[in-house]
Structures are given as structure tokens and as C-alpha cells.
Image: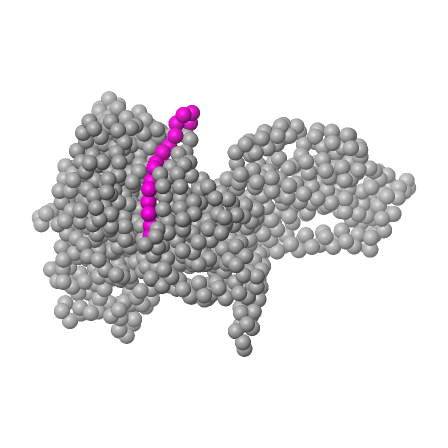
Amino acid sequence: MEDGKILLEVKDLEVVYQTDESTVHAVNHIDFSLKERETIGLVGETGAGKTTTALTIMRLLPERTGRILDGSVLFRGENLLDKSEAEMRHVRGADISIIFQDPMTALNPAITVGNQVLESLEIHNVEKKSKQELEKRVDALFNLVGIPAERKKEYPHQFSGGMKQRIVIAIALACQPALLIADEPTTALDVTIQAQVLKLMENLKEELGTSMIMITHDLGVVAETCDKVAVMYAGEIVEYGTTEDIFTGEAHHPYTTGLFNAIPNLDEKAERLHPIDGLMPDPTNLPEGCKFSPRCPYCTEECRSRTPYRYEKNGHRIFCNRFEKEG
Amino acid sequence: MANLVETVDLKKYFKVGKGRYLHAVDGVNLEISEGKTLGVVGESGCGKSTLGRLVMGLLPATSGQINFEGQDIVTCSRGEFKKVRQKIQMIFQDPYSSLNPRMSIYELIAEPLIVNKVYHDKADILKRVYELMDTVGLAERYINSYPHELDGGRRQRIGVARALALNPKFIVCDEPVSALDVSIQAQILNLLMDMQRDLGLTYMFITHNLAVVKHISDTIMVMYLGQCVESAPADELFANPKHPYTQALLDSILKPVLGTNKDRKLIRGEVTSPINPAVGCRFAKRCEHCRPECMEREINLVDLGGDHKVACTMCGG
Amino acid sequence: MSTGTVEKTRQTTMKKSQRAEIWRRFKKNRLAVFGLVLFVFIVLVVIFADFIVDYEVAVTQVASERLQSPSLKHFFGTDNFGRDLFARVVHGSRNSLLIGFGSVVIGVTIGGLLGAVCGYTGGTFDAIMMRILDSIMCIPTVMMALAIVAALGTSLENVLLAMTISSVPRYCRIIRSSVLTVTGQTYIEAAHSCGTSNIRIIMKHVLPNAIGPIIVEATMAVGTAIISAAGISFVGMGIQPPAPEWGAMLSEAKNYMMLYPYMVVFPGLAIGITALSMNLMGDGLRDALDPKLKD
């Protein structure tokens, strides 16, 4: 994994949603990179900017309101933000594809699932393969995600939630993309099915050599699937490192610690949980200095007034003033 | 201690076609003693929400009994039920759709007080609304706000305040934290546990989140396709799961700890249809220990001692 | 200050602020305010019609002053019987608005409640009601109205009744479909769970959330209702001449339209302005009543 080539590099990305009345600062100057065959987890709560980041990489931000103010997204060295819409259409699906949270709404209810998979193959049919060849590929994809190929003539409502998510995955993987963005792929699924789907994604990743961005709020999913983690809060990455850094490392951003403490622990009985005080800041009116400062138990005068220092140790980055001296 | 709530062979079938019935709840016996929490876990479609609504009296039962303080609320008259209703309240899953968007916070919290004619003076209602807002940790200034102006956590606090308004004894919590972020989820769980301690409430806590259910429950009941497959004190269930489904469920939990998640056992297939289910164990088709016996007869819930009950042929069921 | 007074103050500020909120939101919509101004103007005309111009002027036929163009003497000109059109438009407002508003308000109330009950209860009652309304809907509005007026006799009340009956099915359908969406929401279940009665649920929870589409439909229907009433008047079964009514004025004028366009322009404008004011106000009202669109 060490010598993998860098596939995706997001640099200093800043995205806002602009409406007449207000500006939502959705993503504020984030950096991260992803090597080939690697999985990065974007973790955070609602409003952290995870999905916006994904949409920006796909260039699928809502046209009327979404604005990319700064930064670049380098995919195999090319800046996706400079590409035209027509060029992006070749990238989407073929090089980068995305799986959305809700498999129920991601499929067209009036088209058979086989044809939906076929469609994504036809769109990116660069080698001008014949229809028979494509059909064969559809069958192979169904087998790959563990659905009998006979069922490709059925409609989405004939499948259960877990099966639908498998079909969505088949569509996303149809053209063997180099990068797969999974936006909360298992949140809508039951626990036992979630485990199955994650296992499937893991296996496919190994088999096809796909890199993945796993967007989730579930630290359990991260522990299961990711190599690297970026913890996001209010549009910023507050902590970034390998999964080991985040889960077993010694130094942590107070928000990361808070997230871990807020989950009920299965192995020990605690009388009370330890929620993070306060609420997410209003994204149209973010606090000065460190965005987490109003909820942080270690907040000082300095935190409120200036952007936090960046502490870095062997690639483990923490944006917090508590660690300035060490880094 | 006497049970505050118990159900006897409770059934709810929905007719879905000619001679086709969906067995949403199929012969459930449960007991909750006063001041305790029963956690009900299971996957979607296992009938846990239907069970909650039956106990709430929101759905009529097909057969069986629901005893609240010794009184059967399935067969009692409307007048009697109205009296009981005030003591049983519910907290709903989705704080976004369970609050009428056209009503202010005041109207929302005051509604149970108004419809049950608890107070005759408006000033008393207002006083009680402020009191409830204080109890659930909502600042006074929100009284004229509308639900859409608040975040999920605050909305769920409104839901809790509404449920508490009539001083109930028993609250059915239907996935109350599933739609909330982790840090907010912890706030609401703490609130619920504080309420229980201070007001002596009894909960039926319905969820699919195993970590949450272990944290909050005294006893846990695992449901599969309308039936209770295992029930035991929370710690016992997690330490010593007997039913293969319970084992699989516990095994599928993704722990936020590195290295614990490799090589889990996955159960095959998906939940089968609850419409006109065949005789025998409903989990049999997915079970790796399935024997011919499992498909031949109904499996009984067997008490293994220490309140641990299992419905599995391997345990003599 | 004692606690009691504090509570009182809290409460009054609260009540007031909710109404103030709706008004504030309404005011923000300039077009809606313009609609309101027009509407107030029309209502003033209705109330003070007798002070503006004598009713006699509207019905007196002056043979020597037939078909005159607008002038200082006759602001809107005169018609083929030599009646002053200005006076007819002013006094016609009473009959026209009575039919326009009356039929819509009564129709929406009956249709709305019926639709709400049908959508909310569902089942057999709903199925039977819907089939009855479907069969009413099969009969063209004017035919239906004519039949009713023919059976009950010619009078303003009967025209109103006829218009109402033929409009009920449409409102009922509209409300029913939005009620169906609303009843699926959890807050209806939540209301049940705290013991709210069915009537209160319909009035407090279902209708306020289902009312949006009907407000728009109803405000648009006022103009249509005036025109439909004209159709009935035209075949001689509505308002009896010489009583002035906008729709009837339009149909009377159709033979002279090419040569004396002002005969259709002024009653037409009156109907148009009424319809416009209603539409603008309706849109504004719908938005103002929806707290989600506060900002």
C-alpha cells in the first residue's frame, strides 16, 4: 500500500452554497489525498460537509447555488474542476462513480434492473462492444454482486433493500471505475444486511483494485473498511490520519474524542453517555477561530480568535491549539 | 414486582389479499415491570413497530391481550381506554415528520393538555408548557418557534415533552434516536434515562441499534418475523446469546474498534416474507443449524432460567 | 410583578406574535399586498355602491342615449338600451361578487370538509362518496346548473346553489388527495397517541396542512364562477334583466362588441381585476400561512 500511486488529491477546497439571503460555508479549505487501492473514510455528523465534498469531486453540485471558491481536485494529475461538463460526463461512471445512501430512490422503478446496469455500460462503451458482449458483462456483474443473473429481467420493487443496494453497486462498478465514492451506502440497511454489503464491497475492491471514498457517520463502518480517515466538522477536516492513528493513536482532536465517547460502549456498562455539549454551528454564521471552540471542553481565548495550529506527526494531522508545541 | 405491562399471545395480522395475511406480530408474550426498560430489537419488517403501536392502542389487535396495570386494553370500553391512554405515551422515530409543521412549539406541547382537558385555565397550560420545556432542556425563547426552525435534537426534545405532558407511567419509544447524529443521540438517551430515574417511568424501547439497546435496557427481546425468538436480561443476552439469529445479529455489529471486525460470521440470505409463513421456525431457511425438526412444528419459547428465554430446537424449544 | 401577570404577558405576546407573524410574512410579498389593495377597493365599491351612483341610473333605459362612447356624462359609455355602463358595473359588483365568492366559499367549505372526511376515514364511506361525486362530475357544470335552476325556479339563490353543487366535487377531489398525503404523516399518529379526537385531528392537523392547493384553486375559481354565472344568465335562467351583473353584461354586449368595444371592456376589466386580486392574495396567503416559508 505504501508505494501506491496517488490517485486523487483534494487541495485547499472551498465550497459554498449561495442563496439570496445567506451563504452556507459547506466546505472550508480541506486537503486530503488517496492512493490507488486505498480507502479513505470521511467521518462526521450532519452538516459536516462530507456529501458536499463528494459532489464537488463528481462536479454534481446544485448548479444554482453551489460555488467552488477555491482549491483543486486532482484526479490522476488532472484538475477535475477545470474540465468542461462534456469532459466530466466521460469521467463520471467510467473513472469515478458514486453510490448514494438510499437504494430505494437510486433506481428507476420503471426499468428492469438489468437494463439499468446495461445503460451505464452503453453510455461508456468506448470499445464499441456488441450488445451480446455487454449483456454478458451484465450477467457477470450480477454474479459479482451475488444476485442470480436470471433476476435481471425484474423491476426494482421486486427486490429487497439489501438486494437493491447490490444492484446500485453493480451499476457503479459496471465500468470498473478507478474511484468509487460511497455516500453512507449502508445507513438505510439492516445490521445483518449492512454486514453483508460491506463485505461485498470489500471483496470487490480487492478484486477490481478500486480506490474508495467512504462517507459515513458510523465509526464502526470506518473501522471495518477504511485505511485512512478524515474526521470532518463544520466543513473542515479536524483530524486526518491512518485508521490506526484515529482509533488507537494517543493524540486526538477533542471532537474525535467526543464522537467516540458519545457512542454507547458494548463492552462496558456506563450509567451515562457523554454527549458533546451544544450543537453544530450554523453554517451561515460559523464561529471565529476554531469552529469547534464553542463546544470544546479545552477551549481557550486563543481558540476563539485564530485558526487552530496544525499539528503533524508521521502524517497524522490534528488541527487544534492543544498540540501546537509538539508539532 | 408486579408487571405494569404485559401481553398474552398478542397477534396482529394484516390482510393483504384474498386469504393472504401478513403476520406482523404473531403470538408475542412480553412483561415489563414498573420502572424498567424492555428493549425490543430486530430488523426492519420484524414487527417491532407494529408491536409498539399495538401496545399504544394505535392499532387494534387481531387477538390476544394487552394488560396495563392488570386491565386488558384490547377488550375494555372506549371510556376506560381513554383513561388508560393518558398513562401510555409514545415517542416517535422521526422528529421531522412527527411534529405538525403548522404548529408552534407551544401548541405542540400544549396539545395533549388541551385535548385531555387537564387544565381549564390557559395560564395553567402555559405554566405547564414552560415546566415541560424546562424538564426536557428546551430554552424558553423557543416557545413561539416552529419545528422546522429547530434541529433534530431539539425537535426530539419536543417529542419527549409531549409524551411527558400527561404524566404517563409508560412510554413506548419507537426508534427515538435513529434519525439523530451520534452526539445528539447521546443527549437524548441521557435525557430519557434521567426521566426514568426522576419520574419512575417504564419504557418499551424499540430499536435496531444494538449498542443503544444494550445501554438503555434492563431486558431485551429479540424479534424475528413477528415472533420473539429470545429474551433475556441485557447483559446476559450479550454475553450468552442462544438463538442463532441473536448470535448472528450480535456478530454483525460493527464495533468502532480496530481489528474486531474481521472474519465475522454472516447469515445467509435475507428476511423471508411474513405473508402466510410456513409452520416451523421462521429463521430456519437462513439458519446453519437447521434440522428437519425445525420445519415441522411451531417452536416454543423455553425458559432456561434467570429470565433467559429462547425459541430454538437446540435449546429444547 | 406577580407570577400570574408574568404568565399573562407571556401569553398575550405569544398570541399576538403569531398573527403578527402571518401578517409580516404576507406584507413581504408585494404582489399579495397589491392584490389586497385591489380587493379592499372592490369591497368598498360593493358597500358604497349606492353612494357612488344611484341604482336607478343602472336600470333606467334612455332611448336617446343608446350606445354612447365613454364621456364625462357616462364614464364607461352606455349600452344598447341607453343604460349607464358605469352605474351597471358599480351595481353589478354586488350580484357578481355574491355569485363569485358565494359559490366558491360555500363550495370550498362543503367540498373541503367532505374531502377531508373522505380522505381521512377512507374505506367504504370514501368509496361511495367518490363514486357519487364522480357521477356529478360527469355532467357539464352549466348543464347541471341549468337543470337545478330549471327545477327550482329562477333566482339569485338558486343560481348560487347550482354553481355551488357543481363545484363541490372538484374541491372535494383536490382536498382529498392532499389529505391523503397528510394522513400518512407521523404527526397524525402522534396526535392519536395523545388522545386527540378525530374532529380535532381533521381541523387542527389535517386541514391546515392540506389547505395550500385549495387556496390557489379557489382564488382562481372566483373569476370562472362569475363567467359561468353569466352563461346561466345568458340563457335567461340566472339574474333577470334589467338587474346588472358583470357576466350578463358581457354576454349582452357580444353583438355590439366589434363596433362598441367599451361595452365588453369595462365589465371584462371588472371581472379580470377581481380575479387578479384574488389570485395575488391567494398566493400570498398560502405562503404566509406556511411557517416553513418564513424567511
Could you tell whether A79 is left or right of B69 in the image?
left
Q: How many marks?
A: 0
| Residue projecting furthest to the bottom | C1
Q: Let me know if residue B21 is in the magenta part.
A: yes
Q: Give the residues drawn in magenta, as a range.
A: B17-33
Could you say which is closer to the camera, residue B277 or residue C274? B277
Residue C187, percent across and down? 46, 48
Q: Let me know if residue A156 is in the magenta part.
A: no
Residue found at x 46% / y 50%? B85
Q: Answer with the quarter of the image where residue B252 lies.
A: top left
Q: How is the image coloured?
A: one colour
Magenta span main SS: strand
Report the quarter where the N terminus of chain C lies.
bottom right
Residue C92, percent across and down? 78, 45
Residue found at x 23% / y 60%? A270
Q: Answer with the quarter of the image where residue B284 lies.
A: top left
Residue found at x 27% / y 61%? A272
Could you tell whether B12 is left or right of A179 in the image?
right
Residue found at x 67% / y 32%? C141
